[in-house]
Image (tube, rainbow, N blue to C red):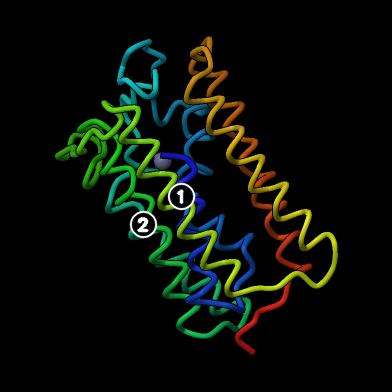
């Protein structure tokens, strides 16, 4: 799953208006932000395997530290508590962040093959395998993204042109990247996948920037 995770973050703004979209992106995508570094360091493994699923050629051999239910529950708790402590945020903000971190597991559980672990490596691996259907994947992800975007647009208003154009540029960019990855050629190597996945950090910065140019409509 790719664009659905951003949909969850956009929707999270409704629950926690004081939290920047950048922090919400970092929460819902924390798993995929940690993952490429863990792959490059050799702690987790992905293989490029054309036809691994109908939707993606990535075969997630092992990713317990970034993607298990246990790991994401721990990361989510730490991120939520850390946010409340450092930013003096409300409890609701911390809870929203923690739930967004764990939501990554739920959406990946829906899309990945039975590869997503509950706990450590060697633990039970689950997954409903929506990726076996291209149409099903596109429909579910598009629906989650559209719902999240609608919530975000209802919860915020542009202060200036950056807040308006920057947001739509970000939305357009996410859709283009998503469609390109869905229908483009498979990446050459696992390392190439991991290096390009590091670009996710730029999306977090982009979201911080845009969100700073929008204000909450709920006080
Ligand atoms: Zn993931």
Tags 1 and 2 in contact by the CB under 8 Å rule? Answer: yes
Residue at the outermost right position: 161
Task: Determine the secondary structure under disc 1.
Answer: helix
- The residue wearing badge 1 is 5
Quarter of the figure with residue 195: top right
**Residue 100 placement, left or right of 166:** left
* Quadrant observed for ligand 1 in the rendered image: top left
**Residue 138 placement, left or right of 123:** right
Residue 61: mark? none
Marks 1 and 2, the one that precedes in the sequence = 1
Position of residue 173 measured from the top left corner of the image (x, y, whole percent):
66, 39
Q: 69 or 158, which lies in front?
A: 158
Which residue lies at the image location 24% right of the left edge and 41% below the top edge? 117
Q: 163 or 127, which lies in front?
A: 163
Q: CA distance from mark 1 to mark 2?
A: 8 Å
Position of residue 106 measured from the top left corner of the image (x, y, whole percent):
29, 51
- Label 2 environment density (alpha carbons within 10 Å; few <14, some 14–19, many ≥20): many
- The residue wearing badge 2 is 103
Q: Indicate if the residue with disc 1 has its beta carbon within 8 Å of ligand 1.
A: yes
Quarter of the figure with residue 87: bottom right
Quarter of the figure with residue 207: bottom right
């Amino acid at each position: 799953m790719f664009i659905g995770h951003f949909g969850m973050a956009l929707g999270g703004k409704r629950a926690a208006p004081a939290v920047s979209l950048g922090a919400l992106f970092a929460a819902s995508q924390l798993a995929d932000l940690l993952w490429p570094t863990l792959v490059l360091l050799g702690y987790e493994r992905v293989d490029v395997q054309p036809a691994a699923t109908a939707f993606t050629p990535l075969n997630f051999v092992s990713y317990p530290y970034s993607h298990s239910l246990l790991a994401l529950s721990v990361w989510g708790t730490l991120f939520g508590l850390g946010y409340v402590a450092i930013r003096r945020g409300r409890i609701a903000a911390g809870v929203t962040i923690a739930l967004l971190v764990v939501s990554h597991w739920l959406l990946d559980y829906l899309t990945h093959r039975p590869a997503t672990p509950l706990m450590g490596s060697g633990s039970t691996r689950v997954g409903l395998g929506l990726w076996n259907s291209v149409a099903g994947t596109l429909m579910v992800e598009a629906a989650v993204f559209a719902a999240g975007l609608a919530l975000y647009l209802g919860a915020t208003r542009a202060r200036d042109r950056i807040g308006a154009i920057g947001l739509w540029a970000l939305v357009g960019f996410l859709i283009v990247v998503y469609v390109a990855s869905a229908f483009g050629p498979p990446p050459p190597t696992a390392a190439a996948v991991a290096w390009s996945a590091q670009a996710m950090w730029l999306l977090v910065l982009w979201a911080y920037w845009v969100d700073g140019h929008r204000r909450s409509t709920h006080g």
